[in-house]
Amino acid sequence: VSHTWGRGCHHGSAPCWSLAWAPLLPLVVARRSSALAGHRNLAIRKHAQAPEHAATGAVVAALETAKEVATSTNQAGLAFQIQQAVNSEKLKSCRNDLLDFEAFFSATEASGRLEEGGFQEAWLEPLLQPRSRTPAQHLLADDRIKTFLVSQVDGSDSAAQAAEFLRVNGFVLLRDALSSPLLEQMQMLSAELIRATTRADTHGNRGWRRYSMGRTTMVSNVLALADSDAVCGVLEEFWGSKQFHVQCSGGDFSLPGAAKQDLHADVPVRAVAEQLYAYHDPSHPGRTF
C-alpha cells in the first residue's frame, strides 16, 4: 500500500493502483467549477437508478447461485463463465459513475490534446487475460523483496510484521489480499476506466500514451479494493488505531509506445509538501508533515 508504487509504471505495463490513506481528519477538496457542468441532475439520476440496481442485484444473486452449483459439481469451466457474467452485471451498477468519471477527468485532468493513432482494445489483453505471476515472484526473489501473506485463517504472517516492514521500507506487498472473484471484477472495472480515460484524452495527460487517473473514488465499486481484512489489519497495526479512512483512490497506466520515465521522487520538496499535505493532529499540535 503505497502512493509511490502507482507512479512507477513502465513501457506497456498493466495499471498500477494506489490507495491514498489518511487518519480521520477533515478534508477540503477544491475542484474546478467546470467539472460539475452537466452534473446538476446527478442526484435525481442516481435516485432513478434504484429500480435498475434492484434488478441487477437479482440477476447477480441468481448467477452466483448457478456458480455455486457449477462449482459443487466440479464444472470449473462453467463456473468461470458464470463468474464472468456476474462481473459484467456488477459493472452495470456503476455505468453512470463511469460516465461521471469520464466527464470529470475530461474537465480536470485531460491534456486537451486529441491526436490520431489512439487506443487499441488489444492492449487490454494483459489486464483481462493475465499470465502467471511466477515471473514477478522471481523478480521479487532476485531483489530480496519480502512479501507477506496476512491471513486470519492460518496466520502465516502477522499484520504486525507487515506493518513493521512498511514502517522501515515505505511500502509492503501483500499476497492474495483480494479474492479471485473480486480481482476479476476489478480487472474488468480497470479496463472500463482505461477506456473512459483514453476517450477523453487520446494523447495522455502525463506524456505520450502515459496516463494518471487522479480521482477514481467517484466510481463507488473501486472502493472494494479497500475492503480487505489483510490491508486494513496492516494499517491498524501501522497507525495503532482503527480511526482511518480512504481519502481518495487513483491509478496510473502506460500504453505501448510510451517512453520510460526518468528516475524521480514522487514526494515533493518540503516547502511544496507542507502546502499540499496540511496536517493537523489534535493529540500532537506540534506535529507537521
Image (spheres, rainbow, N blue to C red):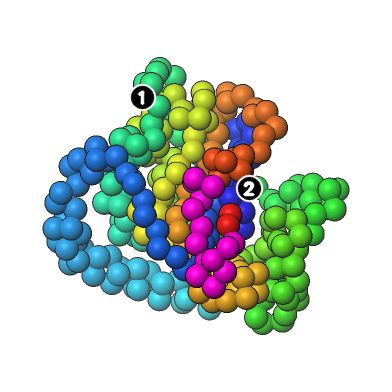
Quarter in which the N terminus is drawn: bottom right
Quarter in which the C terminus is drawn: bottom right
Residue 279 point in image, percent of width and height = 51, 58
Crowd around label 1: few <14 · some 14–19 · many ≥20 (10 Å): some
Q: What residue is rendered at 79% in x and 51% in y? A: 140
Foreground: 14 or 233?
233
Q: Amino acid at mark 2?
A: Trp
Q: What residue is rendered at 84% in x and 48% in y? A: 143
Residue 82 point in image, percent of width and height = 44, 63
Q: Is residue 273 visible?
A: yes
The magenta stretch is 274-287
Q: Is residue 288 left or right of residue 173?
A: left
Crowd around label 2: few <14 · some 14–19 · many ≥20 (10 Å): some
Q: What residue is rendered at 19% in x and 53% in y? A: 42
Q: Which mark is residue 112?
A: 1
Give the quadrant of residue 222.
bottom left
The vertical placement of 17 against 204, above or below, is below
Count of numbered labels shown in the rendering:
2
Residue 203 point in image, percent of width and height = 44, 24
> Quick one: SS at disc 1?
loop
Which residue, given by chain and number where applicable, does mark 2 sit on? Answer: 5
Foreground: 51 or 271?
271
Give the quadrant of residue 88.
bottom left
Residue 286 among those drawn in magenta: yes
Q: Amino acid at mark 1?
A: Gly
Q: Is residue 128 visible?
A: no
